[in-house]
Amino acid sequence: MLPTSSTAPILSAKRISKIYNTGGTTCAALRDISIDISPGEFIAIIGRSGSGKSTLINLLAGLDVSTSGEIISRSDSITDITKLSEEELARWRGKNVGIVFQSFQLLPSLSVLENILMPMDLCNIIPKAERLTRAKSLLDDLEILHQSDKLPSELSGGQQQRAAIARALANDPNIIFADEPTGNLDTTTAKSVMDLFAVLCLRNKSVVMVTHDLALTDYYSRTFELADGVQIVSEDVT
Ligand SMILES: Nc1ncnc2c1ncn2[C@@H]1O[C@H](COP(=O)(O)OP(=O)(O)OP(=O)(O)O)[C@@H](O)[C@H]1O
Ligand SMILES: [Mg+2]
């Protein structure tokens, strides 16, 4: 194992492509995309519908596998995640990334607190004795501690999204991937989610977020734009 450098990107995709094959037709959803994600960056992935934003975030988060290219993770050792087995990739995800979806995807039959405890129990990274305190502290940070015992369906959209963010942070990941996390939220709640992500970046976490909402550009350190599966621009906005 090689030591990691603190200045190196925590995740680097090198010329990744994704070709979907469905029912005899192929769709080149991404072509030769390269992106570096450094600690503390807040990156917005933008582009029109169908341009490949979700595909890119799913590949970077290890939820799906690229057709070609490398994705180098430098979290604790240097690993090309495209070479990992399904089981190794699941372990990598559990330890290194937090994922937030537009539709929350909380488990409906578990309480809010149980939804936060579940990834900790699954991944076994946080010591058992610390899990309950940690889950409660995350819920407190997100101002929904008083909703701990409720089912997700008993929460508002904004509260469910905050529970989903608490769940994504459960194992203290270095990178948070979010696919249109504010898409179902009103402007005020969307802003509070963005403020939360900004605080995470200040703590040297990286946030990579798919968004259509360019009213929120002030938050991003960089935008990464896709058109028809190809990167068209990457610019610093700070
Ligand atoms: N599972 C799949 N099987 C086949 N084709 C797919 C699959 N997922 C996505 N695609 C295709 O890949 C392309 C990129 O899709 P993707 O979902 O990444 O776009 P997007 O930028 O996230 O769009 P939106 O803004 O609408 O969410 C589209 O042409 C889409 O039809
Ligand atoms: Mg999408």
Image (spheres, helix red, strand yellow):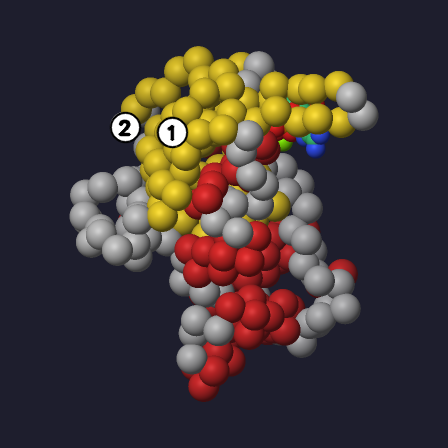
Q: Secondary structure at mark 2?
A: loop
Q: Earlier in the sequence, mark 1 or mark 2?
A: 1
Query: Would you say the residues marked 1 and 2 are in contact, meaning their CB atoms lie under 8 Å apart?
Result: no
The picture quadrant where one finds residue 32 is top left
Q: Nearer the viewer, residue 143 or 98?
A: 98
Residue, x 67% and y 19% (percent of image)?
Answer: 27
Relative to 199, is 43 above or below?
Answer: above
Neighbor class of circle 2 (other Cα within 10 Å; few <14, some 14-19, many 20+) is few
Residue at 49% over, 57% down: 88
Give the answer, above or below, for where 70 lies relative to 197: above
Q: Is residue 229 left or right of residue 23?
A: left
Ligand 1 sits in quadrant? top right
Determine whether 172 is above or below 101 in the image: below
| 236 with respect to 34 (left or right) | left
Mark 1 burial class by Cα count in 10 Å: few <14, some 14-19, many 20+: some
Disc 2 C-beta below 8 A from ligand 1: no
Q: Position of residue 45 (x, y in %)?
A: 48, 29
Would you name the residue on which mark 2 appears?
238
In depth, the one of 45 and 220 nearer the eye is 45
- Can residue 65 be spotted in the picture? yes
